[in-house]
Image: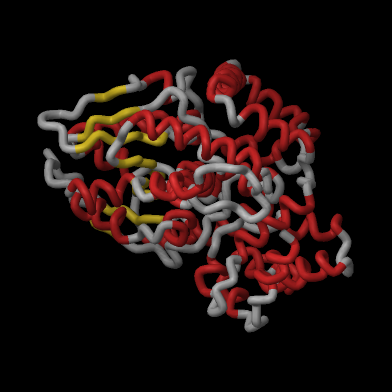
């Protein structure tokens, strides 16, 4: 793998184009934090000139937003290089073995995820969350977990998986049989998004299957270099959707959509003997919700128009991972809403999954710029197609006093059906 890693690193011609697009560099201002700087450091790590400890801190100080990869004239897949370097280092700053245990043992088991959600619901419902914040005891938690804890939205005692049946029939004549990939964040944090999505799909003639055996898409594991666990999840989900015999796989989460769309691509350093060609064929069935509704179904069964202004934030994985930017905007307009574009709509909001748990101040600084742009639109609604972005932007409008509600396009569509 080292030989292949060197080959990919050597594609960089050091032009610096990536520097102009990096949200991290814009905040911290030193070359070592830029994509080009990270490539230099990776080359130094391979040659033994850079210490692994120093490298670990740097490679995790990245949003993996793919902005650098998108503009690289040499085609350097910088995000994949950083993921691979995380795997090679084998260490996670701030959280270490605890996070690995959570990802490998907890997030791979839906029953444990549901149990953890109920514990968090009890934590919020009992008022223990406010009590612990007031005492300051949360400061003893690793990383910035204690500071970011307030961003967690109010939870329901039941997950979306517990609220929805495994099979939802189409309204009227069936046009498609679709599998709904119910991602971890939507399942735990935003069950109303799942309910809205299922309602809209059914209203448009889709029979919706939500397989019980479905597991995490694997993006947290890819993010932290746990490629073997990722391969296990790919194998499991591939089998689940083969057995479901669906025409399409629909996701409401930008990260899940991008990850599933790439599940036929074997990660560098992953030696798992999987049917990657078969996974690639299944990946072609993956759709973002808005893209499927606009490009495949045609949102023509709307019962009533909505009114008012809305602005849209492009999640990184949706815009750059699968190039879906037009369809959510088209859908919002089709619903009768007036779209007001925010400045730099495709710039990362600073969420990046769990980034704020270890880099809270940096995440909030990036978020502040995004919320300033939201405020300038004057729109009372902010739509985005990613649960992590919804959580981040909701915390931002609250923290900076912008009178706007953050909402998923599926929720808006459900109001029109």
Q: Is residue 41 left or right of residue 359?
A: right
In percent of width and height, residue 302 lies at 14, 42
The quarter of the picture where the C terminus appears is: top left
Q: Is residue 118 left or right of residue 309?
A: right
The quarter of the picture where the N terminus appears is: bottom right
Q: Is residue 329 left or right of residue 279?
A: left
Q: Is residue 404 visible?
A: no
User: Which residue is more in the foreground, 64 or 141?
Assistant: 64
Q: Residue at x 50, y 43 (%)?
A: 275
Q: Residue at x 68, y 56 (%)?
A: 84
Q: Is residue 44 visible?
A: yes
User: Which residue is more in the foreground, 155 or 197?
Assistant: 197
Count of numbered badges drawn on the protein: 0
In percent of width and height, residue 39 lies at 71, 70
In percent of width and height, residue 382 lies at 38, 50
In percent of width and height, residue 350 lies at 57, 54
Look at the picture and state if 145 lies above or below 255.
above
Q: Residue at x 46, y 58 (%)?
A: 321
Look at the picture and state if 29 lies above or below 241.
below
Q: How has the structure been colored for display?
A: secondary structure
- The quarter holding residue 140 reads top right
- The quarter holding residue 15 reads bottom right
Q: Residue at x 61, y 47 (%)?
A: 222
């Amino acid at each position: 793998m080292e030989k292949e890693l060197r080959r990919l690193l050597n594609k960089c011609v050091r032009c610096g184009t990536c520097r102009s697009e990096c949200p991290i560099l814009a905040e911290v201002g030193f070359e070592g934090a830029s994509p080009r700087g990270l490539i230099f450091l990776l080359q130094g790590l391979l040659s033994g000139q850079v210490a692994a400890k120093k490298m670990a801190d740097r490679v995790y100080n990245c949003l993996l937003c793919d902005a650098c990869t998108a503009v690289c004239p040499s085609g350097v897949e910088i995000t994949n290089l950083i993921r691979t370097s995380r795997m090679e280092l084998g260490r996670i700053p701030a959280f270490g073995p605890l996070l690995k245990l959570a990802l490998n043992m907890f997030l791979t088991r839906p029953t444990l995820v549901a149990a953890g959600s109920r514990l968090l619901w009890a934590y919020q419902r009992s008022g223990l969350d406010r009590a612990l914040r007031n005492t300051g005891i949360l400061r003893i938690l690793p990383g910035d977990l204690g500071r970011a804890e307030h961003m967690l939205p109010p939870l329901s005692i039941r997950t979306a998986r517990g609220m929805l049946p495994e099979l939802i029939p189409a309204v009227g004549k069936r046009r498609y049989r679709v599998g709904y990939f119910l991602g971890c964040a939507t399942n735990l944090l935003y069950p109303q998004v799942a309910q809205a999505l299922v309602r809209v799909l059914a209203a448009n003639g889709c029979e919706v299957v939500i397989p019980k055996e479905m597991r995490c898409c694997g993006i947290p594991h890819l993010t932290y270099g746990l490629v073997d666990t990722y391969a296990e999840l790919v194998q499991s989900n591939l089998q689940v959707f083969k057995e479901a015999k669906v025409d399409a796989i629909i996701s409401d989460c930008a990260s899940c959509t991008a990850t599933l769309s790439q599940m036929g691509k074997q990660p560098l350093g992953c030696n798992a003997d999987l049917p990657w060609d078969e996974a690639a064929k299944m990946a072609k069935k993956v759709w973002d919700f808005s893209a499927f509704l606009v490009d495949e179904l045609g949102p023509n069964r709307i019962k009533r128009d909505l009114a008012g202004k809305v602005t849209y934030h492009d999640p990184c994985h949706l815009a750059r991972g699968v190039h879906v930017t037009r369809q959510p905007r088209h859908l919002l307009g089709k619903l009768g809403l007036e779209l007001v574009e925010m400045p730099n709509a495709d710039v990362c909001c600073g969420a990046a999954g769990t980034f704020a748990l270890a880099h809270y101040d940096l995440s909030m600084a990036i978020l502040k710029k995004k919320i300033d742009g939201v405020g300038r639109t004057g729109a009372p609604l902010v739509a985005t197609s990613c649960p992590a972005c919804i959580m981040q932007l909701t915390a931002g409008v609250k923290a900076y006093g912008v009178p706007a509600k953050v909402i998923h396009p599926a929720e808006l569509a459900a109001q029109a059906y």
